[in-house]
Amino acid sequence: MRVQVVIIGGGPSGLLLGQLLHNAGIDAVVLERKTREYVLGRIRAGVLERGLVKLMNDAGVADRLKQESLTHHGTVITRNDDFFDVSFSNFVDAPVTVYGQTELTRDLYDARESAGAVTLFNVSDVVITDLKGKAPTVTCKQGGEAITIHCDYVAGCDGFHGVSRQHIPESVRQEYEKVYPFGWLGVLSETPPVHEELIYASSDRGFALCSMRNASLARYYVQCDINDRVDNWTDQQFWDELKKRIPAAFADVLETGPSIEKSIAPLRSFVCEPMQWGRLFLCGDAAHIVPPTGAKGLNTAASDVHYLFEALKLRYKEDDETALNQYSAKALSRVWKVERFSWWMTSLLHRFPEHSAFDQKIQSAEIDFLKRSDAAQASMAINYVGLPY
Ligand code: APR
Ligand code: PHB
């Protein structure tokens, strides 16, 4: 098989890049380790920056998003029983869009299938060779059959646990990591969200988040111990703890119900430099991870895809590799600003086991400053709705 671009990974990064390339007449195949159903079974965040919404529009895959998504112009921040609203529209002319990542990925799969673009599922043993030449080769197996694909470029969109990043020599690769001393226990429930906007709650008992997928599907999280397990928590214990971490004004009206999904996720910050090696370009979780506090995982994958798509388009339409050669520096410039914001929101709102009484007073003072300062709220709003590409 020969294609112009091989995309390793059929998550949102790979699929969005694949759709943009297809629409631009650039031939790409997606190699996915799992099945479509498995990929769509993953529950992920659901806050989209304006840049990602535009990319979905540009890819021609935004119809359902436009019909079913919610538009949020602000968010609530709490400290124990006190709370205030940070109104994005007071500072920046852009809302955020609430639409589940699972639905966005489903829309991208549907579009890919409608376009007749090729996705190979259940592939294994992916190996990339000749990355420093002009014609990389990707080999893999599917159903026991060996497959060889010749291409011009490889997009590593295979997530944190993928193989692409490992193809950058260890002597070249610089990895930066911070593991947070807690996790998030998440629950999905078919109940109306407790509030029309998201609630980021900081309390003496720990962090909580009240989010949603739509008007009848709520998503909640509580900070939990790094070694905690889902079966340590009954639904009732989850609801009781959540109510203790949000202001009474919300706890008193919280509608509870059976969890239809319950899981624990660890929190880490991670960046791999560089994000390219020869003709391999890393996108999304393959190159970086953020703690979910700022809802930046999917949105930073989107900015990577934007930079790589524009660079590939320039290469194929104008025979100009300038942007491809600058991809890693361009992407990393925005990645690190997003890493900082995600670290800042996480540090501000969570209860750290090693924190002293002084540290907790500093957190309270910073939340109080955010409550009272337009400058502080403007900084949060500009970062939360999405830095420009
Ligand atoms: N070969 C082929 N596919 C692979 C391989 C491999 N060796 N390893 C992993 N994959 C697939 C995974 O099965 C997954 O479907 O690559 C895909 C990577 O998708 P994500 O992990 O979702 O990463 P990305 O597409 O960059 O999206 C980032 O997804 O995980 C969330 O929080 C993250 O919101 C962020 C977004
Ligand atoms: C979610 O809805 O799952 C969600 C929303 C905002 C976040 C993290 C997760 O910051």
Image: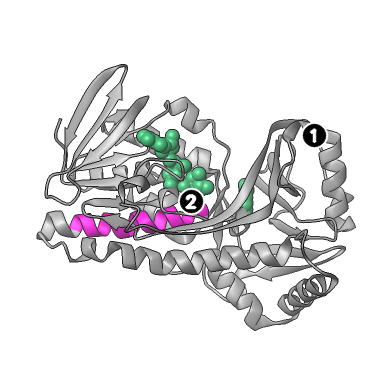
Mark 1, residues whose alpha carbon is within 10 Å: few (<14), some, or many (≥20)? few
Determine which of the numbered discs, if any, sits on residue 298 in the image: 2
Mainly helix, strand or loop, the magenta region?
helix
Determine the residue positioned at 84% across, 56% down.
Answer: 205
Does the magenta portion include 298?
yes
Residue type at tag 2: Leu
Determine the residue positioned at 31% across, 46% down.
Answer: 167
Residue type at tag 1: Asn
Based on the displayed image, in which of its 4 quarters is residue 235 positioned?
Answer: top right
Q: State which quarter of the image contains the N terminus.
A: top left
Mark closer to the observer (1, 2):
1
* Contact check, label 1 and label 2, Cβ < 8 Å: no
The image position of residue 9, as x and y in percent, is: 37, 38
The image position of residue 74, as x and y in percent, is: 65, 64
For marks 1 and 2, the one nearer the N-term is 1
* Span of residues in magenta: 297-313
Give the farthest residue toward the front. 171
User: Does any atom of ligand 1 lie closer than 8 Å to the CB of label 2?
Assistant: yes
